[in-house]
Amino acid sequence: MKFTQIHSFPHHWGINAKIFRGFHLHWAVRSPNTRHVSCCRPGHMHSRRLKLLRAFALAQLVIVLGCAVSVWWCTKTEAGLRFTAARIEHLVSDNIPGSLTVQGIDSFEWNRIRAHGIRILHQDGRVLLLAQNAEITPDWAAALHARLGFRDAAVDGGFVVLSMDPDNRLSLEAAVNSPARPGEPSDPNGGLHYALRSMHVQHLTVALKFSDTFDYRIRHVEGFVGVLRIDTPGVQVVLERIHGEVEQEIAGMNVALTKLDGWLHGKERQVMHLEAKVHLAQSQLATRVDYYDRASDKLKIHVDRSEGVQAIAVTLLAKALASFSKDLTIDG
């Protein structure tokens, strides 16, 4: 066995370098003051790496377990559900001019959330939407894009107010769209974006107030409602297969909506388009209603079909009233 003596180090150190026929190099460094030989072998380096890897894996495990415990606490305990409801309130309210309140979350699963007492408030304090009991399928993909959304929902009880603010904006739009900072113009595409799709509603009251001549409340409403703001500056409200009873009598007759479809768009020239089939006593009335953001002729009602004496009488009465208003036009 051959070895090479290295002479370039100080003479008071003894250094041997043994070369084992091209395998590995072994350095032994020995101090004259001690008989101990300290070695740095590849096996020791491998052991150190293993210890570091084990420590890293343990730290990751602790983090994962901590997250799991936190999620369990937030979604499965009464105190955690209160904390989650408060965080949702703050997250949404901090990004809209109005505010959101959640009275309580009853259960929280990844594919289903049950809550009650959900309210959206206008900045002046008016409650524009109340969902007494709601069951929601969340859209987590929308959440990853910083949007509030769900795939579908069921709402039992409550009300929604569709009205206009003095600045000719939908009240709901004014409550949930991006706030303007003092001294700065509002960002039409800023603020909270949301996709509240396919809400099946029942036992709901809908208040429609667009002018002094168009102010109605519809009770026992059932159907589908969507409230969206994804790639538009204003809110979009979609109504599908809505039916219910109109609270006010018209010409002394009870009125029922047998079918109502349409939409409302904020920050658009045409704010509303509704197509309705109305039951008046023993008569049927089919009509279209359009509302525009302009100085005159804001509300246009087109009667597509009138069947029965009562429907014809109401149509004639409405036309007579419209002749005294600059905001209302009725044809058909």
Image (tube, rainbow, N blue to C red):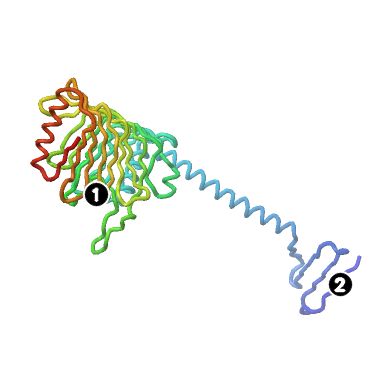
What is the C-alpha distance between the residues marked 1 and 2?
A: 87 Å
Q: Indicate left or right for 18 with 198 as reference.
A: right
Residue at the (27%, 61%) spot, across then down: 185
Of residues 227 and 181, which is closer to you in this image? Answer: 227
Q: Amino acid at mark 1?
A: Ala
Of residues 92 and 180, which is closer to you in this image? Answer: 180
Give the mark toward the camera: 1 or 2. Answer: 1
- Give the residue number, with chain letter if any, for mark 2: 4
Which residue of the protein is positioned furthest toward the top in this rendering?
Answer: 282
Give the number of the disc on residue 266: none
Of residues 34 and 209, which is closer to you in this image? Answer: 209
Residue 30 appears at what percent x and percent y?
77, 69
* Element marked by disc 1: helix
Residue at the (40%, 50%) spot, across then down: 146
Q: Indicate left or right for 248 with 59 as reference.
A: left
| Label 1 crowd bin: few (<14), some (14–19), many (20+), radius 10 Å | many
Sequence order check: which comes first, mark 1 or mark 2?
2
| Label 2 crowd bin: few (<14), some (14–19), many (20+), radius 10 Å | few
Residue at the (12%, 35%) spot, across then down: 319
* Element marked by disc 2: strand
Give the quarter of the image for residue 331: top left
From this view, report whether residue 326 is shown above or below residue 13. Answer: above
Residue 244 appears at what percent x and percent y?
24, 27
From this view, report whether residue 108 is shown above or below residue 164. Answer: above
Of residues 134 and 203, which is closer to you in this image? Answer: 203
Residue 58 appears at what percent x and percent y?
57, 48
Which residue of the protein is positioned furthest toward the right in this rendering?
Answer: 1
Give the quarter of the image for residue 23: bottom right
- Give the residue number, with chain letter if any, for mark 1: 174
Q: Amino acid at mark 2?
A: Thr
